[in-house]
């Protein structure tokens, strides 16, 4: 691997022949030993067998050429006489780093061959003619050509590096200084007082390869940071989902206990199942008598399961109506007599279709109008109110009181419902706090002296609120005045109901349904709060809300 830096330190270690087991190296303090660091100007000539996961390390030495080799004389000007050789090291298989001058191609090949039989981990060369600290030439420079086509890089099973000439000569001088016994090395007398005199003191080389580059370390750091962030995101997401699940269950319990009405609070539009509608009393208007079974047959097609778009008349339960078709015989749903409770209201008109109720006339034998009484004691034509409650809303069209029994809960409680309930609760808390503050200001204004200036009058009136509330269910409502004049009109192009129903049976039924929906008001609860939130949410927020449910929260 490519060399990034080279460090040389001095080590002390015992003679392996005097101890049992491998010798232990001890670094000598840099104040009394040789230490150097070359952090640049290192050229990698060959990376053969260099491992990418470890530095190239070993004791420094110079290979010994055969006697009579002409390269000995050629290298003599650059090699001190007592430079550290293999013979100056213990007879032990230590890892070694060789160093030699690059005198000529032939001498370089001989030095490489001489190091082949040693436990060498790497080879350092420096150009003999280089007297600078500049970076050596590039690996493809002709100066490194040995005339074998580059085969020397693959034949030698160790990496080869080049260092500046001045630095290489300095290292050889230090290698010569640390080739003898302890008493002959620099600061030897001081070292003898700290170590055994038979210990070796030699130079040790550590070549930092590509594994020590900053890039891999940076990637490792980034991966660690990324893993930590992903862990935090995952734990936050799990905590948010767990919190939302607890809130959904809490809201479901509150709805089941009758503490919260989802539609009355504007959270979700609910409908009334047919079996609950069947338990609401039917009776003949003006007589207070429960409806007879044979009379229920006439209204069964309109109240039990009218098909959407059917041509049945919406007035089939009104006796005397000229457009009433012959009754269809279906098994009626009988209402127990105990379910009947006479209404405390005096209502003469169906608030949905605006038709007046007809009382029975014994003289003519005319039957009275059949009406449905809701739990809030408001009455309507069954064909008007049943379709509305079953398909559109669970609130009374007049007083906006739910007709569902206490504890009725939808099968699914979603995060959107939880968020809306929390927003409504927060708004109510703020309104209560504002009302209390306004009452306190009013009380202070009443007990203090009357304001004299305009500013004092304005301050005295801060916080006052005008509020209104629906009439309680138990309080009788005023009689609806009779509608005079011509009330005939048609449904507008936008579907809004006119003042009176049209003549057609299909149009009349649709008109009554649209009028009942209009009576819910502009602040009616949404049919699907999740879809409504999703439509108002940007795409990026939709994606993140799947991971972090709280991102779907809209501040109240």
Image: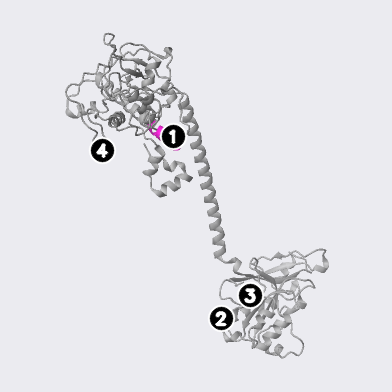
Horizontal and vertical percent for residue 345? 30, 14
Magenta-drawn stretch contains 167: no
**Real-space Cα separation, disc 2 to disc 4, in angstroms:** 84 Å
Q: Nearer the viewer, mark 1 or mark 2?
A: 1
Circle 4 residues within 10 Å: few <14, some 14–19, many ≥20: few
The numbered mark, 2 or 3, whose residue comes first in the sequence reads 3
How many residues crowd around disc 1 within 10 Å: few (fewer than 14), some, or many (20 or more)? Answer: many
Can you identify the residue that label 4 sits on? Answer: 494
Q: Which mark is residue 515?
A: none
Camera-side residue of 307 and 525: 307
Q: Are marks 3 and 1 in contact (CB under 8 Å)?
A: no
Residue holding disc 1? 418
Who's the residue at 27% across and 36% down the image? 495
Q: Secondary structure at mark 3?
A: loop
Residue 441 percent location from the top left of the image: 28, 24
Which range of residues does the magenta coloring cover?
A: 413-424
Q: Residues within 10 Å of mark 3 (few under 14, many from 20)?
A: many
Quadrant in which the N terminus appears: bottom right
Question: Farthest front residue?
Answer: 326
Disc 1 or 2, which lies upstream in sequence?
A: 2
Image quarter where the C terminus lies is: top left
Q: Which mark is residue 138?
A: 2
Q: Dot 1 lies on which element?
A: helix
Circle 4 — which element?
loop
Q: Report crowding for label 2: few under 14, some 14 to 19, many 20 or more residues within 10 A (C-alpha).
A: few
Magenta portion: prevailing SS class: helix
């Amino acid at each position: 691997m490519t060399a990034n830096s080279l460090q040389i330190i001095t080590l002390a270690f015992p003679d392996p022949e005097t101890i049992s087991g491998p010798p232990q190296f001890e670094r000598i303090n840099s104040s009394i030993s040789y230490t150097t660091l070359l952090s640049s100007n290192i050229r990698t000539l060959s990376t053969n067998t260099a491992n990418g996961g470890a530095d190239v390390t070993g004791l420094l030495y110079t290979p010994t050429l055969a006697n009579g080799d002409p390269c000995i004389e050629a290298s003599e000007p650059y090699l001190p006489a007592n430079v550290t050789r293999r013979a100056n090291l213990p007879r032990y298989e230590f890892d070694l780093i060789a160093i030699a001058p690059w005198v000529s191609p032939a001498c370089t090949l001989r030095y490489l061959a001489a190091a082949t039989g040693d436990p060498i981990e790497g080879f350092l060369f420096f150009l003999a003619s280089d007297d600078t600290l500049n970076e050596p030439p590039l690996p493809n420079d002709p100066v490194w050509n040995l005339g074998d086509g580059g085969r020397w890089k693959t034949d030698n099973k160790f990496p080869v590096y080049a260092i500046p000439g001045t630095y290489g000569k300095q290292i050889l001088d230090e290698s010569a200084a640390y080739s003898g016994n302890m008493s002959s090395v620099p600061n030897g007398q001081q070292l003898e007082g700290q170590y055994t005199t038979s210990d070796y003191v030699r130079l040790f080389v550590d070549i930092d390869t590509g594994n020590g580059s900053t890039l891999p370390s940076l990637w490792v750091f980034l991966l660690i940071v990324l893993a930590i962030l992903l862990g935090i995101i995952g734990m936050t997401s799990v905590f948010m989902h767990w919190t939302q699940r607890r809130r959904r269950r809490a809201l479901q319990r509150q709805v089941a206990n009758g503490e919260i009405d989802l539609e009355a609070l504007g959270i979700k539009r609910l409908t009334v199942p047919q079996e609950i509608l069947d338990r609401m009393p039917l009776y003949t208007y003006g007589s207070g008598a429960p409806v007879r079974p044979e009379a229920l047959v006439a209204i069964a097609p309109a109240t039990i399961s009218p098909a959407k778009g059917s041509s049945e008349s919406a007035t089939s339960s009104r006796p005397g109506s000229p457009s009433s078709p012959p009754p269809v015989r279906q098994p009626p749903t009988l209402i127990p007599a105990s379910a009947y409770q006479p209404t405390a209201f005096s209502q003469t008109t169906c608030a949905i279709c605006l038709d007046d109720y007809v009382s029975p006339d014994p003289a003519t034998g005319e039957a009275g109008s059949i009406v449905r009484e809701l739990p809030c004691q408001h009455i309507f034509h069954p064909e008007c109110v049943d379709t509305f409650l079953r398909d559109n809303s669970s609130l009374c069209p007049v007083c906006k009181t739910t007709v569902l029994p206490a504890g009725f809960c939808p099968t699914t409680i979603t995060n959107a419902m939880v968020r809306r309930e929390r927003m409504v609760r927060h708004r109510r808390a703020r309104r209560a706090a504002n009302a209390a503050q306004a009452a306190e200001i009013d009380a202070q204004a009443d007990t203090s002296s009357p304001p004299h200036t305009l500013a004092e009058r304005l301050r005295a009136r801060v916080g006052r609120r005008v509020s209104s509330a629906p009439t309680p269910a138990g309080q009788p409502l005023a009689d609806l005045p009779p509608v005079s004049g011509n009330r005939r009109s048609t449904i507008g192009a936008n579907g809004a109901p006119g003042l009176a129903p049209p003549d057609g049976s299909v149009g009349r039924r649709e008109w009554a349904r649209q009028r009942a929906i209009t009576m819910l008001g502009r602040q009616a609860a949404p049919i699907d709060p999740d879809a409504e939130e999703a439509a108002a949410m940007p795409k990026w927020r939709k994606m993140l809300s799947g991971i972090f449910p709280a991102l779907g929260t809209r501040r109240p």
